Amino acid sequence: MAEFLIWLIAALGAVGGVVLGRIWGQVEGKRTGKWEAERDAKEDKSKRFERGRDAVRDGRGAGDPADRLRRNDGRW
């Protein structure tokens, strides 16, 4: 009987380890995914800011107002 209890405890320990490993892996995956999403959002935000700054720099006071009007006329 004691040998059976030892095997039962070992089997429950193995199953518990597998379940704990799966849960731990999911938590780590979510944490890593969240970190990557935040990093990507920061990069995207900085790129958008830079494009906006470039557009403002190139749009305001960049040449003759009549030329700017002609360039923008086609975009409407």
Image: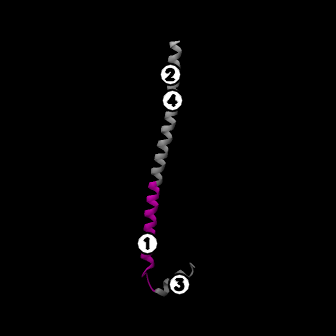
Q: Write down the residue under mark 3.
A: 70
Q: Position of residue 43 (x, y in %)?
A: 44, 59
Disc 4 to disc 1, C-alpha distance? 57 Å
User: Where 5 sits versus 37, above or below?
Assistant: above
Residue at figure coordinates x 52%, y 25% from the top left: 12
Q: Write down the residue under mark 1.
A: 54
The range drawn in magenta is 38-64
Q: Earlier in the sequence, mark 3 or mark 1?
A: 1
Q: Residue 61 falls in which quadrant of the image? A: bottom left
Q: Residues within 10 Å of mark 2 (few under 14, many from 20)?
A: few
Q: Write down the residue under mark 2.
A: 10
Disc 2 to disc 1, C-alpha distance? 65 Å
Is there a contact, CB below 8 Å, between mark 2 and mark 1? Answer: no
Disc 3 to disc 4, C-alpha distance? 72 Å
**Majority secondary structure of the magenta segment?**
helix
Which residue is at the front of the view, 48 or 28? 28
Q: From the viewer's perspective, is the residue at label 2 or at label 1 nearer?
A: 2
What kind of element bears circle 2?
A: helix
Q: Write down the residue under mark 4.
A: 16
Q: Earlier in the sequence, mark 2 or mark 3?
A: 2
Task: Name the kind of residue labelled 4 in the image.
Answer: Gly
Q: Is residue 55 magenta?
A: yes
Disc 3 to disc 1, C-alpha distance? 20 Å
Q: Position of residue 45 (x, y in %)?
A: 45, 62
